[in-house]
Amino acid sequence: MIDPPAHRFRGDDGWELAYREIGEGRPLVLLHGFTSSGLLWLHQGPAATLAEHGFRVILPDLRGHGDSARPHDPAAYPPDVLADDGLALVERLGLGDYALGGYSLGGRVVLRMLARGAHPAHAVVAGQGLGAVTRAGKRASPYRAVLTALVDDVPLEPGSPEAEIAYWITQLGGDPRALLRVLDADVPTSRAALSRITTPTLVTAGDQDGGHTDADALAAALPGARFDHVPGDHFTAFTSPEFATAVLAFLTRPSRPGQRR
């Protein structure tokens, strides 16, 4: 499949950001994980399947990633800027009856958008647990040391987990300086804020995702959420057919009387 062309829009602070689209129908915005890009949803995730089932799938590249702007100035990454960008995209495209989903970092951004007033009919938060969501932005992220080493050109021990992370960042064409600034912009979502999110939400994670074993607790903290395990760890769950099936089933299930679709 030929990658769809990148379209451009400007965030509220003027930086140029990119997104792609496939399919026709009800809009579905899908946010990718850290160091990745929107194309991962198409190359390894369920975007094509969802487009085939009547969705206009919108795949932004988060700030600091992919074809979006990758400024190095810390001022370009104020707290919650990724949520600001997501809200700006929804506004620029004039989306009404839309759905919103995200994996890993993208899942945290979905929650920030919901907490900040986004009103999708459905939301999907995947590859996230309660602890990661409520502690977002902490400097203990394993990525921070790796990115700092890449910026400072410090060798990493061959075969170490840090070296493997560095390899994948390099393979994906990541910009270590920009990605460090993205980490600085990460904002936690408190339990109190989660309790006020009533959007019907699917929370899902891999049954071997050791970093997010409390995904069911995240679902329990969201009044309108349901939880579903899928096979795999944090990386393989995203590519599993079961993940695509779970998301599609959730987004197309009939609404109850009085419930927003």
Image: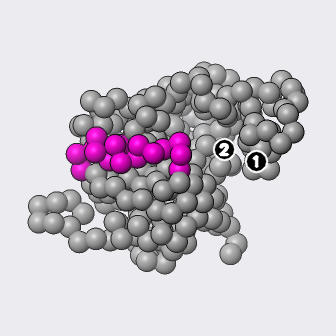
Per the rendered image, the range of residues in magenta is 209-224
From the viewer's side, name the closer residue of 79 and 207: 207
Residue found 50% across the figure and 56% down from its top: 206
Residue 1 against residue 172 in the figure, above or below? below
Between marks 1 and 2 in the image, the one whose residue lies nearer the viewer: 1
Q: Main secondary structure of the magenta part?
A: helix
Q: Indicate which disc residue 68 carries.
A: none
Is 254 left or right of 210, judged from the image as shown? left
Residue found 64% across the figure and 22% down from its top: 74
SS under mark 1: helix
Residue 174 position within the rendered picture, expressed as x and y whole percent measured from the top left: 74, 42
Residue type (three-letter) at the residue carrying disc 1: Trp
Mark pair 1, 2: CA separation: 9 Å
- Judging by the rendered image, the residue that carries numbered circle 2 is 35
From the viewer's side, name the closer residue of 1 and 93: 1
Residue 194 shows up from this direction: yes
